Amino acid sequence: MEIEFDFKKEQSRLLGPVLRPVARITLVNQEIEVPEHLYVDSGADLTLIPKSVGDLLGFKVSQGDSIEEIKGVGERGIPVVIKKVEMRICKKAFEARVAWALIEEVPLLLGRADVFALFNVCFKKNTKTVFED
């Protein structure tokens, strides 16, 4: 099965208009479903969601949770808690770990862990992102 998502045209402060790979993903925690568009980021180890999306999913920082710090480009760390969710890409559902940021100022990123092993992901000439299982 092949699933295609169009690139999203956005404005870059440095480059002007750019095309970015996005995918429509549904995150599910218990009975709560949150559909979102995530940037498909082959350089991200984990899927990253901002605080508000985790709040919508009903996430809470529990006593047994470990607050970790992750870093991307630059030195600024982001406090996160690793949570498990059901993730749906089209009709394919699977369990995935997400890094729930405890701050709002992060992009929604679809990372490699628990996702890329299930699909062949292809970026087609700045027009489509294709997931093939």
Image (tube, helix red, strand yellow):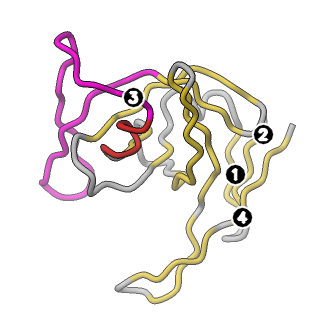
Q: Earlier in the sequence, mark 4 or mark 2?
A: 4
* Quadrant holding the N terminus: top right
Q: Is residue 16 above or below residue 114?
A: below
C-alpha separation, residue under disc 3 versus residue under disc 1: 32 Å
Q: Earlier in the sequence, mark 1 or mark 4?
A: 4
Dot 3 and dot 1 residues touching (CB under 8 Å):
no
Label 1 sits on a secondary structure element that is: strand
Residue neighbourhood size for the residue with mark 4, other residues' Cα within 10 Å, grouped as few (<14), some (14–19), many (≥20): some
Q: Which three-letter amino acid code belongs to the residue tagged 3?
A: Gly
Q: Nearer the viewer, mark 1 or mark 4?
A: 4
Label 3 sits on a secondary structure element that is: loop
Instruction: Name the spot of residue 115 as percent of width and height, x first.
Output: 58, 32
C-alpha separation, residue under disc 3 versus residue under disc 2: 31 Å
Q: Mark 2 sits on what residue?
A: 132
C-alpha separation, residue under disc 1 versus residue under disc 2: 8 Å
C-alpha separation, residue under disc 4 versus residue under disc 2: 15 Å
C-alpha separation, residue under disc 4 versus residue under disc 3: 30 Å
Q: Earlier in the sequence, mark 3 or mark 2?
A: 3
Instruction: Name the spot of residue 125 as percent of width and height, x first.
Output: 71, 69
Dot 1 and dot 4 residues touching (CB under 8 Å):
no
- Decide whether residue 89 is among the magenta residues: no
Considering the whole magenta stretch, tell me its main secondary structure. loop
Q: Mark 4 sits on what residue?
A: 6
Instruction: Name the spot of residue 21 as percent of width and height, x first.
Output: 59, 61
The residue at 53%/79% (across/down) is 18
Q: Mark 3 sits on what residue?
A: 58
